[in-house]
Amino acid sequence: MSRSIGKISINPIACDGHGICGELLPELIQLDEWGYPKVTKNDLPLDLLEHARRAERLCPTLAFMVLLAEPATQR
Amino acid sequence: MGSMEMTEFSSWPGLVVPDRTSDAASIRRMTLRTLSLEEHGRVRGAVRPPKVTYQELVRLVETAGLSGRGGAGFPTVRKLTSMAQYRGKVVVVANGSESEPLAHKDETLMIHQPHLVLEGVAIVADALQATAAFMVAKTKNQLVVDSVETALKERRRARLDRVPVQPRIADPGYTSGVETSVIQQLNGKGAKPAYFPVRPITRGVAKRPTFVSNVETFAAIALIARMGAEAFARMGTSEAPGTQLLTVSDPDGHYQILEVRGSTPFTEVVSFTGIDMLRVSTVLLGGYFGQLIAPGVALGLRVAPAEMKRQGMSIGAGVVAFSSACPVAEASAICSYLATQSAGQCGPCFNGLPAIAKELGRLAQGATLQRGVAEIGRLGDQIIGRGGCAMPDGAVLIARSLFRNFPNEVALHEKGQCTAVKMRPVFVAPEYAKVAS
């Protein structure tokens, strides 16, 4: 896996367990027995950035967030 | 004699002003007698506390080794320095909501010495040049409200506080005491935990940087400012500087509030309170966020959070409770209660806690488990650390401690047996305790 460029974060209060992030990012997220996402790896590698961005865009409750270590414009 | 005696410290000047009957070398009992401003001034040497700059306060709190008394034990100096760049626009909140049902030390402290707490708030508010200050009192206790209101009146008349402290009463419910719930309540919203991905909280009360600490922590800050950091630390040990308030309850559910010097052995706490350890089968350390331990293990401990942490334990907000009942029944009652207290916001909490509670309930009744003990452990792994607040973690920690510390009792229950003399749990109010008796 490529180097970490930031972290993913899920607001557990906003999350309603739609499970889209778990489908898009099985490398970092497991769905629990009720369908709620459990972050298994916090660090976001560069090669998963596109999927993470997609999860962020598609999350119906805006619970999923990509937190880049540095602003994207600087890299 | 009589009441004058209450204004004398025998050997160590602590948070609690002792009365004749409750003073010992390393423990004293807190009474419900309120100290007026005049008495507070007489006991502490002067009505007005010394002026403390931000830099001085940071040095004092660091040297004193003060850690938060709300349960998490976070170093107070780090909380202070995280506010450095926001000085001039900070809101200070003294959290006395104490929603842990077995804890009573905050309400008792606010009744006994409101001025020490309010003085601590004033010191922090001045050092951080705060724009507003709040004090949140425990719900359903008129004595606290009266004591705080009287104290605030006295302080206004003496023109003591630059920033007036605004008193509030905490919303009921277990999760309303969570720091982020308190912020929500002060913002006029429901007292439910909120999610702040970045710490410190820079957009808290009125969207301002917010310094929240437990009321005992503020009282300790006032004491440190008055007596000096070294003298405060020396009341305890290097491992456990200063003193700490405990709520100790016996198998009948009666409690006492104690101030103990750091590293005081539990054997001393037990003999001071007169608890008959021969009647005790289960000890709850740290309240519903803590763990169930065997009586023998409890007797080997000292009141030293850092040492306990190395032993894999935590005293939380200073709760030590003794019970004669079956540990499985106690664990089941606590988890059932916590399941009812979910704010209903996070899946792992409102799904996971009823699942754990249901299994422990079956175990307590000697019924066959649907998941099996190992499965309950895995259920815990699915839940822990995944709520917006730490409440779901509490249920998991209680369940884990039951399986780790009482394996024989758990095994017997799996066969439908129980060795406890008494079934009815005492750690949770009867309406939540679902035990077949």
Image (cartoon, coloured by chain):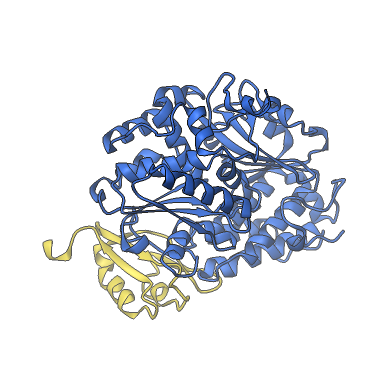
Chain colours: A yellow, B blue
Where on the picture, by quarter, is residue B76? top left
Q: Total marks drawn? A: 0
Q: Is residue A54 left or right of residue B321?
A: left
| Residue B360 in which image quadrant | bottom right
Residue located 79% across and 63% down the image: B368
> Going by the image, does B387 lie left or right of B407?
left
Q: Position of residue B419 (x, y in %)?
A: 85, 46
Residue at image x 72%, y 38%? Answer: B294
Seen as rendered, the residue at the extreme top is B11
In the foreground, B19 or B299 = B19
Name the one closer to the observer, B226 or A71: B226
For the point 23% across and 48% down, which residue is it?
Answer: B85
Instruction: Looking at the picture, tell me which residue is in the foreground, B108 or B233.
Output: B108
x, y percent for residue B430: 77, 59
Q: In the displayed structure, would residue B429 be above or below residue B312?
A: below
Q: In this rendering, is residue B33 above or below B28?
A: below
Question: Can I make out residue B384 in this image?
Answer: no
Q: Is residue B120 above or below residue B365?
A: above
Query: Which residue: 32% across, 31% down?
Result: B59
The single residue placed furthest to the left in the displayed view is: A74
Vertical placement of B6 versus B361: above or below?
above
> x%, y% of residue B291?
63, 46
* Residue A57 appearing in the image: yes
Q: In the rendering, at what x and y percent does residue B171 appear?
A: 55, 63
Q: Quadrant of the N terminus of chain B?
A: top right
Quarter that holds the C terminus of chain B: bottom right
